Image (cartoon, rainbow, N blue to C red):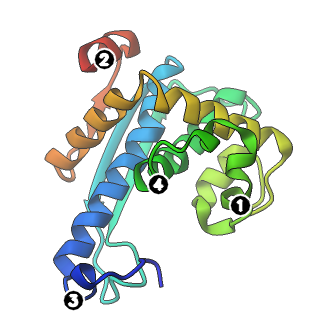
Amino acid sequence: MRHRINRRMANSPSRIMAYDRRLAAIHEAGHALMGLHLGFDVDAWIHPRKTDRPLDEKTWRGHVTIRNMPEDTSDPRIRAIALAGMVAETLWKCGHDEDRIEPYGWEDLLLDEDSMSFSDWRLAGCEPGEPDDDLYELAAEVAGLFMGDLWPVLTNLSRTLMTDIGEVHSFTNAAARIQQAA
């Protein structure tokens, strides 16, 4: 099962949807913030997904479009953006565990092919569940950024995505946005 079932969630599709909405928002905010942090313009949104099996399938989805992104997929900034959603989601679910700023803190998670979407794995330049050594280092680096001064910005971007469901939010001028949210 996709969720660790607790008594409050097991019989409440609305609680599952609320949890999924938060996860989708923090995940997409992670991609968006890393894009902004690296100097790109970003469009991001989340929306509900119809499913008859909310315990087994995500009930919310999100999308991020990085405008002015380099076409060369070997650009290391693209790998950081690809990882950022999973890193943000993990930090939100598990807290700011100091092990996450070390490469070994990501070993188990990155070996799980379901830890990232197929498109995120593709942008990271790896097959699902087959990270290279540099990906562990990069995950720790992104976690360090998010656990530091960028955490309030990340949560503010996430709240923005949850506020206007289905609306495309365009984020530009990274420096101004980061200072405004801090």
Gap between marks 4 and 1 measured at Cα: 14 Å
Q: What residue do we see at 57% from left, 30% from top?
A: 144
Classify mark 2: residues with Cα within 10 Å, few (<14), some (14-19) or many (20+): some
Please tell me whether mark 3 sits on a helix, a strand or a loop: loop
Could you tell whether 50 is left or right of 31 in the image? left
Q: Nearer the viewer, mark 1 or mark 2?
A: 1
Q: Which residue is mark 4?
A: 94
Going from N to C along the chain, the mark reached first, 3 or 2, is 3
Q: What residue do we see at 20% from left, 73% from top?
A: 15
Q: Which mark is residue 116?
A: none
Q: Which residue is mark 1?
A: 108
> Closer to the camera, 156 or 57?
156
Tell me the kind of residue under disc 1. Asp
Gap between marks 1 and 2 measured at Cα: 34 Å
Tell me the kind of residue under disc 4. Cys
Tell me the quarter of the picture where residue 4 sits: bottom left
Circle 1/circle 3 CB separation < 8 Å: no
Q: Which mark is residue 177?
A: 2
Q: Which mark is residue 11?
A: 3
Circle 3/circle 2 CB separation < 8 Å: no
Could you tell whether 44 is left or right of 166 in the image? right
Tell me the kind of residue under disc 3. Asn
Circle 4/circle 1 CB separation < 8 Å: no
